[in-house]
Amino acid sequence: MARRNRLLVPEAREAVDKLKANIANVADPEDAKFEIAKEAGIPLQKGYNGTLTSKEAGKIGGSLGGNMVKEMIRIAQEKLQNKDKG
């Protein structure tokens, strides 16, 4: 079972999951971390991953989270620019 981080706004879960899937280029947000790991050459698998180093695990989460933040900032900037035009 995947661990779920608690969001400050629980109603945002669907949108966050959609963003995560878009960033990783997968249909299911649960597969996002596996796709990122595959791209980074990290042997992440479903189930036990106790053999991963902290550095490897951090690369997966950091890459995914960082890209999600960059995309959220890009979307916000785009909305602000469109608001100024209208």
Image (cartoon, helix red, strand yellow):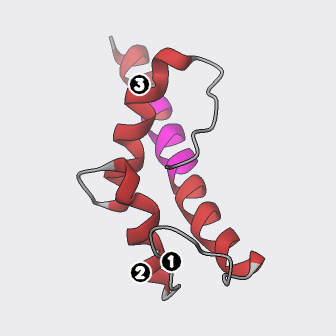
Q: In this rendering, would 7 be left or right of 39?
A: right
The extreme top residue here reads 86
Gap in Å between the C-alphas at discs 3 and 2?
Answer: 33 Å
Magenta region, residue range: 68-76
Residue at 66%, 81% in the rendered image? 52
Gap in Å between the C-alphas at discs 1 and 2?
Answer: 8 Å
Q: Position of residue 22 (x, y in %)?
A: 32, 50
Secondary-structure class at tag 1:
loop
The residue under label 2 is 38
Q: Quadrant of the C terminus?
A: top left
Q: Position of residue 78 (x, y in %)?
A: 41, 32
- Mark nearer the N terminus (3 vs 1): 1
Q: Which mark is residue 44?
A: 1
Q: Quick one: 72 or 38, which is closer to the camera?
A: 38
Q: In this rendering, would 44 be left or right of 35?
A: right
The amino acid on which the numbered mark 3 sits, given as a three-letter code, is: Lys
Query: Which is in the foreground here, disc 1 or disc 2?
Result: 1
Q: Residues within 10 Å of mark 2 (few under 14, many from 20)?
A: some
Query: Which is in the foreground here, disc 3 or disc 2?
Result: 2
